Amino acid sequence: MSVKEIFETMDYGDAPESAAEALRWLVDGGDRFGLFIGGKMTEPGAVFEAKNPATGEVLAHLTQATKADVDAAVTAARKAQSKWAKDGKARAKVLYALARLVQKHARLFAVLETLDNGKPIRESRDIDVALVARHFYYHAGMAQLMEAELPGREALGVCGQIIPWNFPLLMLAWKVAPAIAMGNTVVLKPAEYTSLTALLFAQICQEAGVPKGVVNIVTGDGAVGEMIVTHPGVDKIAFTGSTAVGRRIREATAGSGKSLTLELGGKSPYIVFEDADIDSAIEGLVDAIFFNQGQVCCAGSRLLVQEGIADDFHKRLVARMAKLRIGNPLDKCIDVGAIVDPVQLERIETLVAKGSGEGTVHQPVSAPEGCFYPPTLVSGLEPASLLMQEEIFGPVLVSTTFRTPAEAVEVANNTRYGLAASVWTENVNLALDIAPKLVAGVVWVNGANMFDAAAGFGGVRESGFGREGGWEGLMAYTKPKGKATPVKPAKAHVKPDDIEVLGLDRTAKLYIGGKQARPDGGYSQAIYSPKGKLLGHSSIASRKDIRNAVEAAQNAKGWAKATAHNRAQVLYFIGENLSARADEFASRIRDLTGTTEAKAQAEVTEAIDTLFTYAAWCDKLDGAVKPVPMRGVALAMNEPVGVIGAFCDDRPLAGLIEVVAPAIAMGNRVIAVASEAYPLAATDFYQVLDTSDVPAGVVNILTGPHTELAKTMAGHMDVEAVWSFSSTDISGVIEKESTGNLKRTWVNNGMSRSYPARDWLAQATEVKTIWVPYGE
Ligand code: NAI
């Protein structure tokens, strides 16, 4: 095309980035790559092909790791871990070197990423690689500050990390940087479609002086992922990928004692109010859904636009889409690149063909031949339709309309996911009124797809659990120092030959929705003292009682909105009323357990102390303002988790208060299942609750067999988290049954340890990151 013609058409000319360096790197690597284990590349084994999705050409051959390879990687990681964990300042220097080396090889990383994944070079160069460097810088600082800022915490050990193909190098950085900063060592598996930048990263690990075995990289498909997940030498699994695989990993790790974080799919709403700056909202939307061909877990894939502006908005959007340039990802002018693999392309095509029936499909630009999919809008869908509910993971936006802010919130939250949301309005009151009402881990006000190492990222509901980034991200890679000891089961006292009956019979019922309730099954159990006295009968709760308690707890949503000051007042009041009856409770504890008067008194004192501690914390678990490097700030808000089911340990009173106090302090509602062996102090506690202004349904107390109740509690779709400190072995059941709605679990795995208040508070809250424009 001549210059004259270019001036006439105003078309963009080609501006391709050279792939020569990256291709040379592949050739230098010998075309066949081994694995990175113990600081060295192994000889290649059985191989599979790494392809350029834009052209279909084979870029290299990569090793499918075997069981023996995974064993070797875990062994290398284990061997390196304790030494690596010793010196945070030394770790900081290594992470700093990694950040510098990522910058020094920035262009090579960017081109290799684009060749391997198909994403536009503009994105890999300006976003992916830049964020990777930032992540290592930030976490170099975390390693430096660990001792001072995270006293009493230590590394978990060996972390297995499994990452997806949409941001291959960035996901590697999100996983590796915090893990090694805290003194863990890692075995990482990149996705089979996109492993090349991970192998280049292995090379810079050598140049940065990462000690042998601290970072190990094994390539291969899901089978290799499974080997890591089930490996007994791995202490923690961190996974990013599809919800379906996340569920399988939850199941596979259930009862194993491994820590787990899951960052899964989404169907994030993009809400545009009629007073929004429409041009900005359209640019934001292009970024929200067409960035990385829409293969983004937090893509703003569900447009909710206010009815009054919907027609105009759609018209302008389609006009903007018509200007998007789709094609060669290496071209610096390209907006939309290739889909990662023909398999993913087919998945997108099938879903759109199946689900767009009732809507109108707009595809103003066509895609070139090959592994490309055109930017697509499907408008006029009902909130319940397939495409509004399923994650498409492609450049496909679906839209619907709403009338009022309340309706916007309702439609936005009408999804099983809860990863991110965008809110567009020029009205600050409206934006900040809506943000807390959205069920999502991240909310962007007048923005989309903003990320930073300092800001926590992660979801709720079926988008997974755990946060990455910020201080909150480090909780998932550390644990309190100190050894856990095996839980000693309490002795339940058996029926004596001669039953001694004490005074008038008192009936201990269940406590549901602020009322004493007879067990639905109509069964009770006699509770004896060690000396054979009949102390009373406790109810045997059944599945139906759990369901009633969950309903009562769900109806008590108002508690989450009570001010922190009010919640503190209620907790103090419970403490005060318990204190007034201290002797009565001490005597009950003595009768139940046979302990000494002093120990029983000490347990009551501990319970009162715990109530005062969490009363104090109610209005002091401050959120944070994250200084993200862009025009704005990210607020980290501590929100309650929701309804928490908790199985208590065998301290009759202190075990109950230990779970109830932090849970309700943070605005949760709780269903506590009392010690199986010693339930009667918990049932006495109703009267304290009744006189302490605790709203009905905020605290519910059940008694009965933990094993049976654990299954129902963990399987219940309206329970958001389950904790267990039970002396009955129910950790595995809870983790396995929790896969339904992927609720958070916190279980003891048969080991007992004392957790600092910060751990309790972290378990009782979800961090919501809200990005707001601020300053210039
Ligand atoms: P995937 O979830 O199967 O793959 C992610 C990673 O998990 C890869 O490294 C894979 O090898 C590994 N993996 C697969 N099966 C495993 C198992 N049983 N145990 C351990 N690791 C295993 O994702 P896939 O199949 O590539 O994409 C399917 C769909 O998942 C996409 O269409 C998209 O909807 C969604 N997805 C979501 C992502 C997100 O970030 N939310 C990322 C990638 C995919």
Image (tube, grey):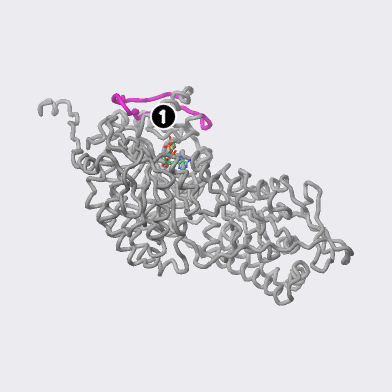
- For the view shown, which residue lies furthest in the bottom direction? 598
**Count of number-bearing discs:** 1
Q: Is residue 337 visible?
A: no
Q: Find residue 510 and report its horizontal and vertical position in percent.
A: 75, 54
Quarter of the view holding residue 44: top left
Q: Find residue 473 and report its horizontal and vertical position in percent.
A: 43, 56
- What residue is at 27 percent from the left and 36 percent from the top? 59
Where in the image, quadrant-wise, is ligand 1 located? top left
User: Is 374 part of what is drawn in magenta?
Assistant: yes
- What residue is at 27 percent from the left and 53 percent from the top? 204
Q: In the image, 466: left or right of 61?
A: right
Q: Find residue 764 and report its horizontal and vertical position in percent.
A: 55, 57
Q: Which residue is mark 1?
A: 348
Q: Nearer the viewer, residue 207 or 443?
A: 207
User: Is 500 part of what is drawn in magenta?
Assistant: no
Q: Which kind of residue does numbered mark 1 sit on? A: Ile
Q: Is residue 389 visible?
A: yes
Quarter of the view holding residue 675: bottom right
Q: In the image, 350: left or right of 644?
A: left
- What residue is at 42 percent from the left and 48 percent from the top? 70
Ligand 1 within 8 Å of the CB at mark 1:
yes
- What residue is at 18 percent from the left and 35 percent from the top? 15
Q: Quadrant of the N terminus?
A: top left
Magenta span: 359-385
Q: Is residue 423 above or below residue 609?
A: above
Q: Secondary structure at mark 1?
A: helix
